[in-house]
Amino acid sequence: MTTEAIAPPPSTKSQVLRSFDVADFPAVNGLEEEWRFTPLKRLGDLVSATKLTGVAPAVEHGELPAGVTVSHVAASDVDGAGPVLVPFDRISALAYGSADGVTLVEVAPETELAEAVVIRVVGKGGDAAAARTVVKVGAFAKVTVILEQTGTASLADNIEVVTADSAQLTFVTLAEWDAGAVQAQHIKLQVGKDSRVQHVQVALGGDLVRQFTSVEYTGRGGDAELWGLYFADAGQHFEHRQLVDHSVPDCRSYVGYRGALQGASAKSVWVGDVLIRATATGTDTYEINRNLILTDGAIAHSVPNLEIETGEVAGAGHASATGRFDDEQLFYLMARGIPEGEARKLVVRGFFAELVNKIPVEELRERLGDAIEARLAEYAS
Amino acid sequence: MSTLEIRDLQVSVKLPEGDLKPILAGVDLTVKAGETHAIMGPNGSGKSTLAYSIAGHPKYEITGGSVTLDGQDVLAMTVDERARAGLFLAMQYPVEVPGVSVANFLRTAKTAIDGEAPKLRTWAGELRGAMEKLQMDPAFAQRNVNEGFSGGEKKRHEIMQLELLKPKVAILDETDSGLDIDALRIVSEGVNRVRETGETGLLLITHYTRILRYIKPDFVHVFVAGKIVQEGGPELAEQLEAEGYERYVAARA
Ligand SMILES: Nc1ncnc2c1ncn2[C@@H]1O[C@H](COP(=O)(O)OP(=O)(O)OP(=O)(O)O)[C@@H](O)[C@H]1O
Ligand SMILES: [Mg+2]
């Protein structure tokens, strides 16, 4: 049902080869620690090609509020001395090298928005493609950015998020691909001094979705919360990896991922690495992954890794739990007259409630709640 | 007037290895609406087993006998059907349901029991009133079901449900345990309100006579080793208070 495996310490992983050239990375054979859970065959060109030539998904958005711009620019316009996300594996290098320009989302300093900025990324099928997105949030801005990914695609995409001092960003990414879609994504969050980033990562659709999120801090007082919600159906593979690199004192991180799985060979992988370097005194961090196995045949792998190189932390912990439906909860609800199907819905909605409530848009919260219930209905007896 | 009839009920607990361990050795009991019965017995005598098997908990297997509510076969019903038929179990150890608010839970339960959603306008008031009567802070409505509730808060929450759901027959399993004297009084007042409607049959399961000073039973049944060994009126409770269960337990040995 679940695997908790010994993995190399996060420090080893943070020192891996970095290069802009795919060819510098050895071919992936599936035995590597970071690839051993991934069904490589299904990644196809994303893992084997040295250049991706397909058409990237279309980027769409409605009218943008004052202070927010979305543009398509040349890489040289955003990278300056170098990209925020320096490729550290084959696919991130492939995305970097193959992407045709960069989608740049800019939020001007001190912009405060009540409404979320919604950007839709729509895959139109075709050959494997690459894309880069850069989100820059100016100092003291306070915004919610939602990135919805839908349609059909075979996509390697890098997303680089930079928040300036005291910026507050809620960043919601939704993988709601059509069946058959394959995605290998790398997200890098660079958190400024006293800045607060809440990332909510939702994976519901697609055949294989592998998302690697890394976090670094550029000043004291940075705060990153990484929330993840996934629901894997028969045959779906959802993989989430994080590397939170604490090298700056007095920063905070919280990683909370929750998933439900149902159906034959539904599979999820969560590998959470947190590294607290010797310089990062006063760090406060916690990571937790919980999985709910709804039927036989589903597999959840869950591997937390916490490495601490300083004695002076404010807090550090991790937890992982994978289990089946709690029959006592079901009994309690049914003993109050609630039919089994409805009781199951309540319990599963409840399981995800904490995460869904992180999304500051009611309409989206409801849509996700309904999507989760619809999934459950597929297996209702 | 509703009647719950338990006839020669024999129940085993399912052990993890799949074996059955007999607990109830033929229980006979009739509870009518408006009546209050107390079942008293030592630890491990099978009181909770009786309560849970009537409610339909999957951990127990019925090996003989019958349970009917107004002639309907309760044992043939699923857990939720039993509740909708009019049975209620206030649990000894209420279960935590993370992420489900009390307000949402109660509205869903009320809708299921009544067969229609409660009127929006009156429901909020009804809920607030029920909470007030049991001296529960209104903030509980937004908390998750039983999560982080103290022992006493959990029991008050159970009795609040009893008042809101208005069952035909309610079984209260050790509702008095873990309550301090104030909470015991508040909970007992709730039970007495239900009793005074005359529309609910009450089956109080308890180890101690403490709660019976607040809720006067019409009938007392002494429960030892999976069956009722003596029956009487309220005076039997007083006798148990003075003498304890030794007499009955010793008689078996
Ligand atoms: N899973 C189990 N395995 C073995 N024995 C069990 C199991 N569950 C219950 N029993 C036994 O069944 C018997 C009856 O238990 P029950 O909980 O019904 O007693 P009770 O009268 O409610 O006790 P108490 O006053 O402590 O609440 C006890 O001896 C108990 O140990
Ligand atoms: Mg008991």
Image (spheres, rainbow, N blue to C red):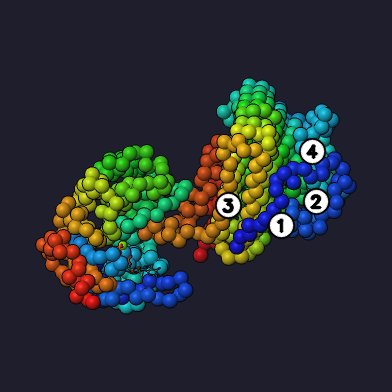
Residue picked out by circle 3: A320
Q: Is mark 1 within 8 Å of ligand 1?
A: no
In the rendering, at what x and y percent does residue B35 appear?
Answer: 17, 61
- Residue drawn at x 72%, y 38% as measured from the top left: A188
Q: Earlier in the sequence, mark 2 or mark 3?
A: 2
SS label for mark 2: helix
Q: Secondary structure at mark 1?
A: loop
Same subunit, labels 2 and 3: the answer reads yes
Q: CA distance from mark 2 to mark 4?
A: 18 Å
Q: Is residue A58 above or below residue B203?
A: above
Mark earlier in primary sequence (4, 3): 4
In the picture, residue A338 is in which quadrant? bottom left
Mark 4: amino acid: Val
| Residue type, label 2 | Leu
The number of discs equals 4
Q: Which residue is mark 4?
A: A86
Are tags 4 and 1 found on a single chain? yes
In-image side of A39 versus B140 (left or right): right
* Front: mark 2 or 4: 4
Question: In the rendered structure, which amino acid carries the disc numbered 3?
Answer: Ser
Quadrant position of residue B172: bottom left
Tell me if label 4 and label 3 are in contact, CB under 8 Å. Answer: no
- The amino acid type found where label 1 is placed reads Phe
Q: Which residue, given by chain and number where applicable, does mark 1 sit on?
A: A37
